[in-house]
Amino acid sequence: MSFDPLEEDGFNERIIVVKAESPEAAAQKALNRYEMYYNNLQIVSVEDYAMGGSVKYRKKSLEERAENLVGSSTWHELGKLQKAEVISELVVEGVLPNMMAEGGIATSEKFAVKYTLADGKMVEVVYNSKNDMDEGIAEFYLANDVENVEVQEQKKKSLFDMAKKTDTPKSKSKAKPEVRVVGIESEIARYDELKEIINNAKAEQEIIGGKLKQIGKEQFLELYEEKGGRPDNFNLADGDEEILFIVMDKYKKVEPEKQAILDQYKGLLEVVTTYSFNPEVLDRVGEVVSNLILESKDLSDDDKNKLIIKDTTVAIKKGTIDRLLDYEDPEQIFDLVEPILALK
């Protein structure tokens, strides 16, 4: 029986299985065929058999892709709001989506964004400006369990219902039973070995990424001074290699000790107040929320008072990265406000 690797490929929304004459050939074919989002794939398994080989890939989650771009150490310092804002800017700047219009999205008048939720539902929202899209993606991401965001060129009007995000109950840890299987010792050992190799590679990537970001920051500030304003994102290049350096108008969380320092510089901080539904109350009275808008009497005063949660934080003011020259020492301000940096 002949082996046709092209006909043997399997593909769905989350898993890609690529088959060829060998695992190495399958990996190369995956790179050639799915190049536009190859970096968003993670190897699940590799098989080698008499007639050929295959590589199974899993699509990385939205957060995994964002973490890979900004670096694990930076990513884990961010709060939920900061992560949502970083994801929104990466999408708006055309760095994160799997598919988008050729040449980016900056020239469009309206922006159609398709969200894929964890439960498989698709929600499409149309934003009237780039700024609206930036803020809208962050808000939608905070309110829902989003797996993927795709920017499209559609300009039709769209309505959507915000899906509630429910917390998965934590299960109590307990000792797992042991099932003895003869013949898999080498596979287990190799799996653990590969896991250690990957962890070591990630650690090295973080170190190198830190060095490249420092170099990128220095070049960014030089260009800033020369141009008299914020430069566009640029490629760091040497020889035949290049990597995109991105400076975002998004910042790390302001801790109390940092706030005391930033307060000394006029215009760096702002008070951000966010409102969200109390999920416990919303689950209990979800069916009558629409009636509440029409001054429904179905809710108790107690539930009305508890339904909305108010959270106030201090954050770096949006647009700070565009105003570095307003200060005597732009590099000092850059280091104080800590804009999120990414490499691609």
Image: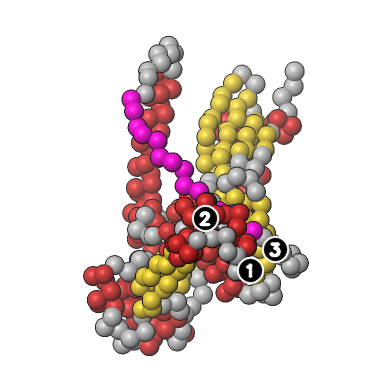
Mark toward the start of the polypeptide (3 vs 2): 3
Residue 270, image x, y percentages: 38, 78
Q: Residue furthest top?
A: 182
Residue 161, image x, y percentages: 64, 58
Helix, strand or loop under label 3: loop
Residue 341 as seen in the image, left or right of residue 150: left
Q: Which residue: 76% across, 67% down?
A: 156
- Label 1 neighbour load within 10 Å: few <14, some 14-19, many 20+: few
- Label 2 neighbour load within 10 Å: few <14, some 14-19, many 20+: some
Using the numbered discs, state the Cα–Cα distance from disc 3 to disc 2 in whole angstroms: 21 Å
- Tell whether label 2 touches label 1 (CB within 8 Å): no
From this view, report whether residue 23 is shown above or below residue 307: above
User: What's the amino acid at mark 3?
Assistant: Leu
Instruction: Please identify the quadrant where the N terminus is shown.
Output: top right
Closer to the camera in the image, 169 or 334: 169
Helix, strand or loop under label 1: loop
Q: Is residue 120 visible?
A: yes
Closer to the camera in the image, 135 or 237: 135
- Mark nearer the viewer, 1 or 2: 1
> Which residue is identified by label 3?
159
Q: Quadrant of residue 217?
A: bottom left
Closer to the camera in the image, 147 or 12: 147
- Tell whether label 2 touches label 3 (CB within 8 Å): no
> Which residue is identified by label 2?
282
Using the numbered discs, state the Cα–Cα distance from disc 1 to disc 2 in whole angstroms: 17 Å
Using the numbered discs, state the Cα–Cα distance from disc 1 to disc 3 in whole angstroms: 20 Å
Task: Give the residues in magenta.
Answer: 161-175
Task: Tell me the chief SS of the magenta region.
Answer: loop
> Which residue is identified by label 1?
294
Q: Which residue: 23% across, 70% down?
A: 257
Q: Which residue: 66% across, 52% down?
A: 122
Residue 326, image x, y percentages: 38, 88
